[in-house]
């Protein structure tokens, strides 16, 4: 499984991207996309109209880069965008509810699903093939085979 979004090909077909102060996109400013290339590991670099020099780029630091969902490249099989996973119900192979995906965070070893259980406790689950039995984005459901203790149960 791979989270799409950091790869340049994810954005190449977007005519515009938006810079916003927060994830909500309130007050976002559209910029025509002029180019996209590979950056450091898990990064891509974008060239936007109106962000033409170092000063403009520095003023954009810390902003959220947003795209219209319809403008993103279609994810390959076994690839997912973060927005597709957030909100998915999570259960184990027996059908026991474990919680819902609240977010995804990057980690050096593997990206981590942030799963909030019914009590509101957060559990970090590595996005590893060994743990993921099924990801059904259309049904908003993820089935895991978690090791004992990951969700607080005793071995």
Image (tube, rainbow, N blue to C red):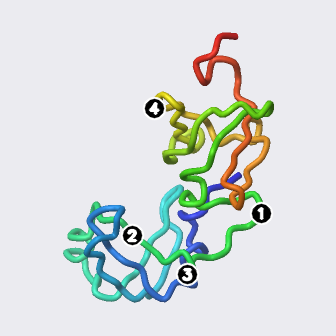
Taking the spot 54% from the left edge, 32% from the top edge, the residue there is 117
Q: Residue 43 carries which label?
A: none
Marked residue nearer the N-terminal end (3 or 1): 3
Graded by Cα atoms within 10 Å as few (under 14), some (14 to 19) or many (20 or more), the crowding at tag 2 reads some
Residue 98 in picture, x, y percent from top left: 63, 32
Taking the spot 66% from the left edge, 54% from the top edge, the residue there is 140
Decide: marks 3, 4 in contact (CB < 8 A)? no
Task: Tally the numbered discs.
Answer: 4
Element assignment for label 4: loop
Taking the spot 45% from the left edge, 71% from the top edge, the residue there is 45
Residue 39 located left or right of residue 132: left
Distance from Cα at disc 3 to Cα at disc 1:
18 Å
- Residue at label 4? 120
Q: Between tags 3 and 4, which lies in front?
A: 4
- Residue at label 3? 71
Marked residue nearer the N-terminal end (3 or 2): 2
Distance from Cα at disc 3 to Cα at disc 2:
13 Å
Taking the spot 29% from the left edge, 80% from the top edge, the residue there is 29
Distance from Cα at disc 3 to Cα at disc 4:
34 Å
Q: Kindly indicate the quadrant of the structure image that contains residue 69.
A: bottom right
Residue 99 in picture, x, y percent from top left: 58, 36
Residue 4 in picture, x, y percent from top left: 60, 62
User: Which image quadrant: the C terminus?
Assistant: top right
Distance from Cα at disc 1 to Cα at disc 2:
25 Å
Graded by Cα atoms within 10 Å as few (under 14), some (14 to 19) or many (20 or more), the crowding at tag 3 reads some
- Residue at label 1? 77
Q: Kindly indicate the quadrant of the structure image that contains residue 3.
A: bottom right
Q: Residue 65 carries which label?
A: 2
Which one is nearer the viewer's eye here, 84 or 97? 97
Distance from Cα at disc 4 to Cα at disc 2:
29 Å
Q: Between tags 3 and 2, which lies in front?
A: 3
Q: Is residue 5 above or below residue 135?
A: below
């Amino acid at each position: 499984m791979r989270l799409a979004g950091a790869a340049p090909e994810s954005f190449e077909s977007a005519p515009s991207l938006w810079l916003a102060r927060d994830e909500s996109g309130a007050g976002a400013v559209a910029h025509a996309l002029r180019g996209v290339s590979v950056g450091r590991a898990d990064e891509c670099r974008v060239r936007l109209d109106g962000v033409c020099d170092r000063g403009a780029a520095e003023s954009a630091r810390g902003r959220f880069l947003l795209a219209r969902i319809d403008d993103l490249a279609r994810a390959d099989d076994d690839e997912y965008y973060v927005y597709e996973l957030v909100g998915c119900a999570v259960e184990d192979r027996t059908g026991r509810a474990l919680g819902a995906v609240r977010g995804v965070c990057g980690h050096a070893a593997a990206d981590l699903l942030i799963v909030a259980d019914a009590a509101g406790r957060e559990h970090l689950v590595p996005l590893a093939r060994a743990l993921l039995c099924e990801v059904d984005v259309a049904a908003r459901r993820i089935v895991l085979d978690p090791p004992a203790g990951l969700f607080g149960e005793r071995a």
